[in-house]
Amino acid sequence: MTLTKAHLVEAFLAKNIFTKTESARIIDTLFELIKQSLQNGWFRQLDLAR
């Protein structure tokens, strides 16, 4: 099974913490932060072999 944005939104929604709109906004923000970090080389600076 492929994990999609929709799956993540539904997982947040299932916890009854956020609305569907809020959940989608959180996931969008998270993806944007990851994208920016990758573009800036931040993850390459981590030593993930530890």
Image: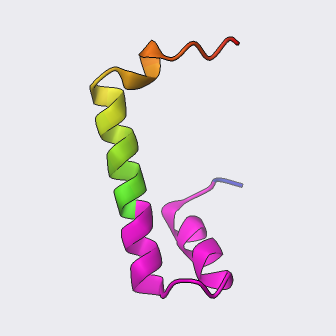
Q: Quadrant of the N terminus?
A: bottom right
Q: Position of residue 45 (x, y in %)?
A: 44, 14
Q: Residue at x 62, y 56 (%)?
A: 3
Query: In terms of image quadrants, where is residue 42?
Result: top left
Query: In terms of image quadrants, where is residue 14?
Result: bottom right
Q: Position of residue 29 (x, y in %)?
A: 35, 59
Residue 36 against residue 43 in the figure, above or below: below
Tell me: 45 left or right of 16. left
Q: Main secondary structure of the magenta part?
A: helix
Q: Position of residue 9 (x, y in %)?
A: 53, 72
Q: Residue at x 52, y 83 (%)?
A: 18
Q: Is residue 23 magenta?
A: yes
Q: Nearer the viewer, residue 21 or 2?
A: 21
Q: Is residue 17 magenta?
A: yes
Q: Position of residue 2 (x, y in %)?
A: 64, 53
Residue 44 against residue 33 in the figure, above or below: above
Residue 33 against residue 21 in the figure, above or below: above
The colour scheme of the drawn protein is rainbow
Query: In terms of image quadrants, where is residue 36?
Result: top left
Q: Residue at x 34, y 20 (%)?
A: 41
Magenta residues (range): 3-27
